[in-house]
Amino acid sequence: MSENRNRAWRRFKDRVKKGKGMGSDELYKPEKKWKLMYFRKNKLARAKQLGLDYPIKSKRQLLDQELPSDE
């Protein structure tokens, strides 16, 4: 069973293996066309599925949420 490894096979394998080096895969890949999701409830549901924090909160908002003021 010999495989026919000609130029076309080598070119195919080169295309398949492109971008598989160290650091080439992205750690975070956001949702495609996120801006086209119009309704807030849809965005909240999709963000929950993806494990994203939406709406994005600033550090100040997170600190205020953690430390409630008793005044």
Image (cartoon, rainbow, N blue to C red):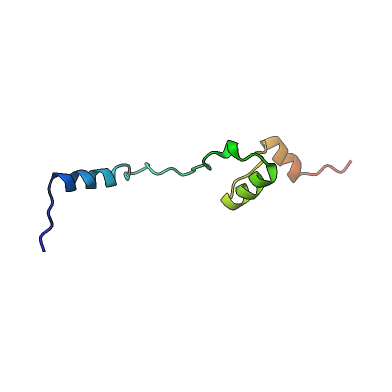
Tally the marks.
Answer: 0
Single out the residue that lies furthest toward the right.
Answer: 71
Q: Nearer the viewer, residue 8 or 23?
A: 8
| Residue 39 left/right relative to 32 | right
Q: Residue at x 29, y 42 (%)?
A: 18
x and y percentages locating residue 40 in the rendered image:
69, 42
* Quadrant in which residue 66 is drawn: top right
Q: Classify the position of the C terminus by image quarter.
A: top right
Indicate whether 59 appears above or below 20.
Answer: above
Q: Which of the 4 image quadrants contains residue 53? A: top right
Between 63 and 4, the one nearer to me in the picture: 4
Relative to residue 38, is residue 15 drawn left or right? left
* Quadrant showing the N terminus: bottom left
Across and down, in percent, residue 11 comes to 20, 43
- Residue farthest along the left direction in this orientation: 2
Furthest toward the bottom, the residue is: 1
Q: Residue at x 18, y 48 (%)?
A: 9
Q: Residue at x 61, y 47 (%)?
A: 47
Residue for point 40% across, 44% down: 25
How far from the left and from the top, in percent, is residue 49?
59, 52
